[in-house]
Image: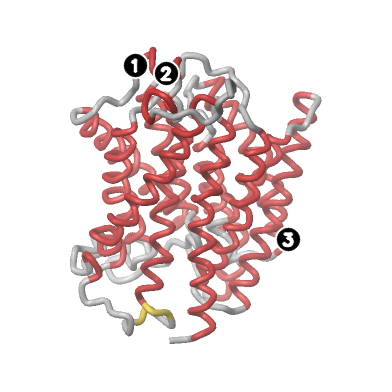
């Protein structure tokens, strides 16, 4: 065990949990109508609690167990055989478990943005549980757990797919699942309503920005120069994307909005995530600058052209951002040349296609199964009244007192 590495990953674990609670909750909560803000908080908080238990029970074993190239197995369920003295590299394995648990929390929580204001709470809990176990955890095993996309024994690509902190594992899977769920759920009754609290959105985005240092820097799993570079390029990409989003918004609409600028921040963070361990500052500026434009265009494409009410633009920002950053590894990855990494494009594109198809099929099946257990969508009356009151018996704001 390395003391410095352990201390840094303890901090990184706290930072990644901070991304979901309260960062993502505030970011999403500010974007919805006032009558639904508590429901968004409830979704994020409940998912964090439930995924933690399920990660202990089965998720960690499926993702990092000693199964085969496709499935990690259940040999480490409930951390059987793992003690405070067990090591994963230079870290206590229990700390590696906890760090990866925070990723298992935020990934299904990202999907919340696609279905806010019209989904039943019971569906959220059951869907998120099955999705984490049967979509997220297997994909983790394929890429990070030494499975079929990692280039190890039985690996599909001999060169191995590179995904430093989750462009495929987190952002592509969550983005595609969000798109599928939004399509099957249908649009809100009134889609053209501005965010109820842009200030809350900015505060949440700022927390996500800070937490992302643990997300990307912690993925180095060491307190070294690689972690420092990952944090630096993460920050630069976020800054560049914020500015290009605002500039493109100014060109298109004549004004640059606060909500737009901080959404650009998230686009830059998502895009640099898979590449943050493989690129330098100049490449990060390029990735962020391009992400701020293409993710903004994707928002309009999904909602206006295709008519899909992916309410808070999960696919356009996270899904497309993660896919774009994954491809940039093949284009810019400085580590690739050092390692003699050949066939970079084949490995990156192939993994995106395989994971994308699997996510579409598995997510669709899960939705159909859960719909047989509990309703997918709330009634029209409940939607108009707001989920805060109808689902949870509370109001975010009391304007009468």
Q: Going 64% across and 31% down the picture, which residue do you hit?
A: 197
Quadrant in the picture for the N terminus: bottom left
Q: Earlier in the sequence, mark 3 or mark 2?
A: 3
Residue matched to label 3: 282
Q: Earlier in the sequence, mark 1 or mark 3?
A: 3
Q: Going 52% across and 78% down the picture, which residue do you hit?
A: 7
Q: Quadrant of residue 259?
A: top right
> Any mark on residue 379, and which?
1
Please state which of residues 36 and 192 is positioned toward the viewer in this rendering.
36
> Any mark on residue 383, and which?
2
Q: Going 39% across and 66% down the picture, which residue do you hit?
A: 98
Residue 379 horizontal side relative to residue 330, left or right? left
Crowding at mark 3 (Cα within 10 Å: few <14, some 14-19, many 20+): few
Is residue 356 depicted above or below 229 in this figure? above
Residue 116, position in %: x, y? 45, 30
Q: Going 53% across and 49% down the picture, which residue do you hit?
A: 22
């Amino acid at each position: 065990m390395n003391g410095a590495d352990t201390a840094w990953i303890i901090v990184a674990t706290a930072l990644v949990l901070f991304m979901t609670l309260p960062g993502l909750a505030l970011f999403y909560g500010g974007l919805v109508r006032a009558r639904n803000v508590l429901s968004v908080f409830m979704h994020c908080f409940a998912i964090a609690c439930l995924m933690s238990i399920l990660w202990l029970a089965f998720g960690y074993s499926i993702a990092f167990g000693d199964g085969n190239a496709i499935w990690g197995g259940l040999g480490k369920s409930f951390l059987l055989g793992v003690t405070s003295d067990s090591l994963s590299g230079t870290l206590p394995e229990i700390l590696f478990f906890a760090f990866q648990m925070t990723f298992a929390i935020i990934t299904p929580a990202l999907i919340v943005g696609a279905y806010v204001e019209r989904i039943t709470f019971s569906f959220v809990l059951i869907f998120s549980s099955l999705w984490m176990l049967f979509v997220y955890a297997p994909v983790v095993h394929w890429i990070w757990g030494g499975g079929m996309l990692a280039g190890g024994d039985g690996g599909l690509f001999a060169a191995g797919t590179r995904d430093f902190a989750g462009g495929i594992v987190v952002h592509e899977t969550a983005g595609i699942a969000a798109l599928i769920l939004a399509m099957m759920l249908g649009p809100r009754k009134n889609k053209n309503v501005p965010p109820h609290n842009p200030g809350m959105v900015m505060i949440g985005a700022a927390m996500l920005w800070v937490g992302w240092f643990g997300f990307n820097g912690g993925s180095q799993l060491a307190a070294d120069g690689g972690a420092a570079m990952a944090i630096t390029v993460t920050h630069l990409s976020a800054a560049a994307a914020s500015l290009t989003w605002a500039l493109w918004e100014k060109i298109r609409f004549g004004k640059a909005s606060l909500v737009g600028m901080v959404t650009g921040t998230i686009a830059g963070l998502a895009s640099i995530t898979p590449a943050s361990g493989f690129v330098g500052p100049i490449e990060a500026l390029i990735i962020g600058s391009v992400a701020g434009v293409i993710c903004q265009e994707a928002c309009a494409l999904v909602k206006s052209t295709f008519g899909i009410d992916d309410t808070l633009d999960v696919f356009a920002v996270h899904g497309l951002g993660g896919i774009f950053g994954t491809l940039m590894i093949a284009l810019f990855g400085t580590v690739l040349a050092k390692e003699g990494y050949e066939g970079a494009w084949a490995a990156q594109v192939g993994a995106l296609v395989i994971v994308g198809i699997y996510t579409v099929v598995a997510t669709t099946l899960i939705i159909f199964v859960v719909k047989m257990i509990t309703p997918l969508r709330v009634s029209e009356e409940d939607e108009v009244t707001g989920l805060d009151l109808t689902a949870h018996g509370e109001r975010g704001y009391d304007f009468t007192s």
